[in-house]
Image (tube, rainbow, N blue to C red):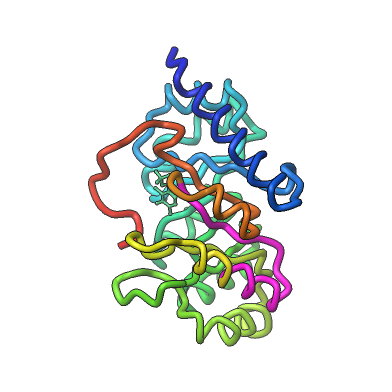
Amino acid sequence: MNAAIRSNIDRVREHIRQAATQSGRDFEDITLIGASKTVDQATLREAIAAGMQVFGENRVQEADTKWPELRDDYPDVELHLIGPLQTNKVGSAVKTFDVIQSLDRPKLAAALRRCRDRGETLPRLLVQVNIGREPQKAGIMPDDLDEFVTACREHYELDIDGLMCIPPSQEAPEAYFTALEKMRRKLDLKHCSMGMSGDYAAAVRSGATMVRVGSAIFGEREYAHRSDG
Ligand SMILES: *Cc1c(COP(=O)(O)O)cnc(C)c1O
């Protein structure tokens, strides 16, 4: 048993609680998502035993190898896709995940609609926004967001639950968090998924309803590739 996991989770929760209190928000309105890419099953079991209920994976294939057994053992656990989704993986993604946070282009919306038309129950959907307008990063550009969300709703007949962003890594994130929260309000959506290990408290103070925390819970990991490429 790795006692560090439990104390890490407790510490992150406490910081979320403090940030919520500071900003007059309800702790219960914020979902802590364990960003569990590269984390093995044994460690995931420890995290679940320590009370974690919601996890985010970056890759469909990795989730499909790690999670089926865990899902059987812990039916209340919720799984989010927080990494990029290829169109040819949509069929398995809709079966594996409860939430897809990386809806970022019309082709994906069209593929999701086709799944639904075939009778699949779709996961809840968040639109990923390229909040820093970074050329190499995934996400809908802020200027195109209204149009894309309208197309999702009216043309593809998809319910959109919220927005997700990964701000530029070398800059202070607050202005980006505030901008995403403003977009959420304007579009009358429920969720803002923003904030990672380095900045989740700031994200909560800016209105995050979901924070995606990896290394602060599971420790530093070496990633084979970048998650936001
Ligand atoms: C890895 C990852 C996180 C968590 O990052 P940490 O800095 O380890 O907390 C959050 N969101 C996404 C999309 C990720 O890929």
Residue 206, image quadrant: bottom right
Q: Is residue 80 above or below residue 84?
A: above
Apparent side of residue 157 relative to residue 220 in the rendered image (left or right): right
Quadrant that contains the N terminus = top left
The x and y percentages for residue 181 are 62, 68
Residue 72, image quadrant: top right
Q: Of residues 120 and 76, which is closer to you in this image?
A: 76
Q: Residue at x 55, y 43 (%)?
A: 33
Residue 72 is one of the magenta-drawn residues: no
The residue segment tinted magenta is: 180-196
Q: Looking at the image, can residue 174 be seen?
A: yes
Q: Looking at the image, can residue 120 be seen?
A: no
The x and y percentages for residue 102 are 48, 63
| Residue sitting at the far top | 1
Q: Of residues 51 and 111, which is closer to you in this image?
A: 51
Q: Residue at x 38, y 50 (%)?
A: 59
| Residue sitting at the far front | 22
The x and y percentages for residue 78 are 61, 41
Q: Is residue 159 above or below residue 215?
A: below
Q: Residue at x 47, y 76 (%)?
A: 140
Apparent side of residue 31 relative to residue 175 in the rendered image (left or right): right
Apparent side of residue 114 relative to residue 104 in the rendered image (left or right): right
The x and y percentages for residue 95 are 55, 51
